[in-house]
Structure formats: structure tokens, C-alpha cells
Image (cartoon, rainbow, N blue to C red):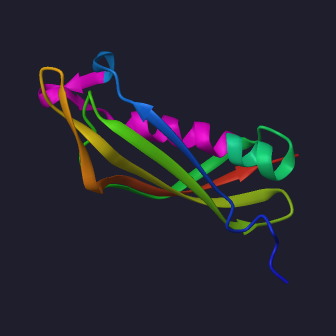
Amino acid sequence: MTDPRVGLTVTHRRYVPYAHAHYAGDLVDGAYSLGLFGDVATEVCIRTDGDEGLFASYSDVRFTAPVRAGDVVEATATVTRVGTRSRTIEFRCVVVCRGTGGSGAQVLDPPIVAVTAVGTVVVP
């Protein structure tokens, strides 16, 4: 029998402020997305176990497209495995809107997958 927590998905959406631009072209460093993954993993742990949990590791982190200041991104976490105290989670960070210069912006259809990863969290 499959654990009912497997398949739980949580998504956070966030505007990327220009204060986070770290490189030329308003690029944001990869750690920004990993920080979002930590936030969404915390909500997963609260929902599945009533505890914030602790991040134990990342594996298979892939940066597939840039995240830029002015973007709107979605960080999504999906529980793929439930152990006694550990949870395996798949993460995706997608760019759903992108600035076009000045105050202009556009909705991206389809969104751009910027970062994927697999992580392990532990709960008491």
C-alpha cells in the first residue's frame, strides 16, 4: 500500500527582486532557487508531519535556464518517497513571467524550467 503522503505537491510563487541580481544581465545566482526549495520543503514537512523538518541533502541539481531579476518563479516540491524519518522530494523552479525592459513584462506560455533537483529531508 502506498503512503498517502507520496504525491503531495506544494508550490510557492515569488517575484525575483532586482536586489537579488548578482551577475551581468540581471542574472540571479543558483542559490536563490535552492533557497526557494528549502522554503517549499519546509511547508511539505509541516503538511506531512506537523514539523518544519531539516534538509539533509540535495542530489541531481540541474540548472537548465537562467533566473533573472524581474522574473516571477514557481518553486514546486512533490513527495516521491516516505521513509521512517526521511522524505524524498522532487523540486522544480519554473519561470512563469519575465520582464521585458522598463516596467514591461510577459507571461511565459509555456513556462521555462530553470532548476530541478531531488532532496532529502528528515523529520523527528
Q: Residue 99: x and y, percent? A: 20, 32
Q: Residue furthest top?
A: 19
State whether residue 95 appears in this view: yes
Q: Residue 98: x and y, percent? A: 23, 38
**Which residues are drawn in magenta?**
21-42
Q: Main secondary structure of the magenta part?
A: helix
Q: Quadrant of the N terminus?
A: bottom right
Count of numbered circles in the view: 0
Residue at image position (70%, 50%) is 121
| Quadrant of residue 18 within the rendered picture | top left
Q: Residue 31: x and y, percent? A: 41, 35
Residue at image position (29%, 34%) is 71
Q: Is residue 64 left or right of residue 49?
A: left
The magenta stretch spans residue 38:
yes
| Quadrant of residue 43 within the rendered picture | top right
State whether residue 64 appears in this view: no
Q: Is residue 97 left or right of residue 4?
A: left
Q: Residue 60: x and y, percent? A: 45, 61
Q: Is residue 40 left or right of residue 2?
A: left
67 or 13: nearer the eye?
13
When the figure is inspected, residue 62 is found, relative to residue 26, above or below; the finding is below
| Quadrant of residue 97 within the rendered picture | top left
Residue at image position (12%, 30%) is 25
The magenta stretch spans residue 16:
no
Q: Residue furthest bottom?
A: 1
